[in-house]
Image: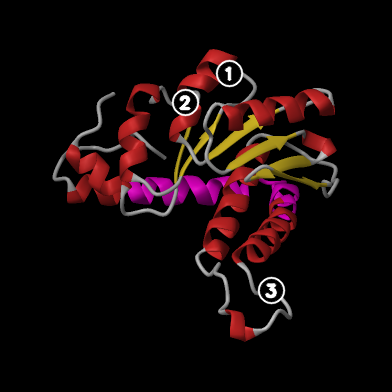
Amino acid sequence: LELTGMDRAYIAGYDIVHTSIFSYVEDELPLIRQASSFVSMDFSDSADKEYLRQCAPYIDCASISCGDMPRNEIEKKMALIRKFGCRHIVIATRGSKGALVMVDGRLYEQSPCLVEAVDTMGAGDSFITCFLINYVDAMKDSRDFPAASGARGTVTAADYQDLAVCTAQPFTRQATARRMDHSDLAKCFRMSKALYKKYYEEAKGVYYEKVC
């Protein structure tokens, strides 16, 4: 895989670029970093320290699947990813145990909305997608109010960020719990196919299928 100038221009048109350990774009991450204002990468449960060290400096958000990993080990791994250079967010999903989210070094925890799931395929993907969409969209309005505005309510960028994180997580858990019939994932696939088709037409024959 080798990104072209047209690829980078296309990437630059979106708020978030998301990739994964299974996308095999490690060597292109520096170029993706240059083209995108926000890069997210899902490491699943498959990344070793050297792989994390290689990729972390180029991403804003790292996601890891932790399952039954002890809580203290999860926090150590999240801190390690930050140490390796991840710029902003580390998400650790734990299935029925909920999720941990570290934002700029601050740790948040979200309990799950437990359901009798028919199929958990794509639940982690739904979590990452819903959280990032809500968080990144909310942070567009984040700012420090002028001193003359007063101190009541949410008046600093830091306070707004805290509110954005706490608000995005419940949305995420509800989205994950809803996935009983693959409807959310099906919508995602339909949107992706539409984007691919659109880009295929715009590129006049260059079929783009590199970053979903």
Residue drawn at (59%, 57%) of the image: 135
- The answer to whether mark 1 and mark 2 are in CB contact below 8 A is yes
- In the image, the segment drawn in magenta is 173-196
First of labels 1, 2 by sequence position: 1
Tags 3 and 2 touching, CB below 8 Å: no
**Residue that mark 1 sits on:** 47
Secondary element type, mark 2: helix
Callout 1, which amino acid?
Answer: Ala
Mark 3 or 1, closer to the camera: 3
Q: Judge depth for marks 3 and 2 and give the one in front.
A: 3
The vertical placement of 23 against 61, above or below, is above
The part of the image, by quadrant, that contains residue 30 is top left
Residue count near mark 1 (Cα–Cα under 10 Å), binned few <14, some 14–19, many ≥20 = few
Residue lying at 53% horizontally and 70% vertically, measured from the top left: 141
User: According to the image, label 3 marks what residue?
Assistant: 154
Q: CA distance from mark 3 to mark 1?
A: 38 Å
Residue topped by disc 2: 55
